[in-house]
Image (cartoon, helix red, strand yellow):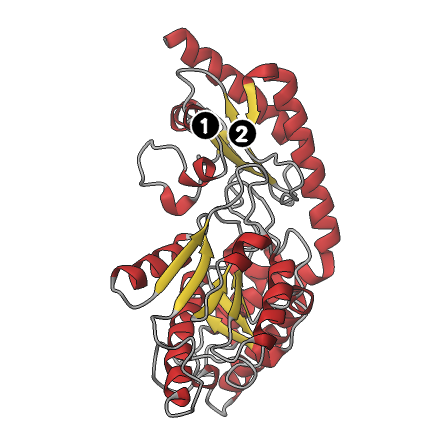
Amino acid sequence: MIYMDYNATTPLEPEVIEAISEALQEAWGNPSSNYLAGAKAKAIINESRENVARMIGGKAEDIIFTSGGTEANNLVLHTAMEHFRKSRSSAKGVEGSRNGYDGLPHIITSNVEHDSVKLVAEHLQSEAKADVTFVPVSKVTGRVEVEDVVAAVQSNTCLISIMLANNETGVIMPVQEICSRVKSLNKQRQHVRILLHTDAAQALGKIPVDVGELGVDYLTIVGHKFYAPRIGALYVDGPGTRTPLHPMLFGGGQERNFRPGTENTPMIAGLGKAAKLVASNLSAYESCMRSTKLYLENRLQTVFKNRIHFNSHYPGSDILPNTCNVSILGRTLQGWRVLSHCRKLLASVGAACHSDSGNRPSHILLSCGIPSEVAANALRLSVGRWTTEADVDAVVEDLRETVQLLEEMN
């Protein structure tokens, strides 16, 4: 079997497994304890925090460990709500300061976000706790456009959350430009500050990510997308000082009270090791994946000719180096049907979290302007660091045989 679903999850690097095993055996103590096993655990956590920060060009004190990306994203939206409430409370009684505080808090996001942003925003909207603008991506470029985001800003806007790269199309969003424009707006505003967040789950380990260059207040980190275990972190630019961060949980005071709970030392050790590998080897990883993806696209084009449609090609947009979303055109070649008959290929038709959505075309692709009959045939092929050209040849041949079989069956 040949795995090409690295946007869904990645295997652990051998060095990551080694780091986890070492922590399980030697750092089993409570990190808050003073004896050797506890001190060892605390040292591993501190080192991992440094490594994660270095991977994104940040500072160790700006990293908060979480259970994963979903928790990190929820924490940001929760914080934005509290930020608005506290800003409104402090503005009461100050003459001329009510502008922007009379309505509900307003959140801006795109219509192609991960469910851990999208569903939280929809929930807040349905409960009449927030107003939400879902800015549609361009059907030409596949990305959310800067001017559309800026045009959506209202006096009560308290958060803009735009993913750094889309998990299905691989389109890289103009987060840096959005942050630059909104920071200029913030300087002119007398009301609530607009907080800036990006979910970088799909970008880390594939393209350079630098929080200083992006200009974000928050950045979500997801370990299992870059060969680390299923744990995450949230970057916050000066948590509780320059940038608000309001906990959802209360407990023993770990993570400076922002995310209490006894630390999961082995998984944090794995995250830190994986981050160190990214910081040291990103250029090689990116080059290898880009080369393999281009070879994959060329082979698909050669074999299927005008029956191939690339759903991850958008004029003027940069795309992740590993992501190829493709449809093989044909009445019986729906993506789910093709994958269920492949003998070697392990891939998906879209986001892993939507795998129970039946056989409906991806709403992400539809939002990007892909016709329904084309989107229904979509295969998301995402290569990894060590995917070879031989793997690609075998997958393309597997697809060729599967298409022939399905058409003969019909």
Point out residue 46 in the picture as x, y percentages from the top left corner: 58, 80
Please report the residue visible at 66 percent of the width from the left and 60 percent of the height from the top. Answer: 209
Check disc 1 and give the amino acid type. Answer: Pro
Q: CA distance from mark 1 to mark 2?
A: 13 Å
Please report the residue visible at 63 percent of the width from the left and 70 percent of the height from the top. Answer: 184
* Residue 24 visible to the viewer: no
Residue 326 numbered mark, or none: 2
Task: Check disc 1 and report the residue beneath it.
Answer: 371
| Relative vertical location of residue 130 with respect to residue 257 in this rendering, above or below | above
Front-most of residues 29 and 243: 243
Please report the residue visible at 63 percent of the width from the left and 68 percent of the height from the top. Answer: 215
| Relative vertical location of residue 250 with respect to residue 319 in this rendering, above or below | below
Q: How many numbered circles are shown?
A: 2
Front-most of residues 282 and 147: 147
Residue 254 numbered mark, or none: none
Q: Quadrant of residue 246?
A: bottom left
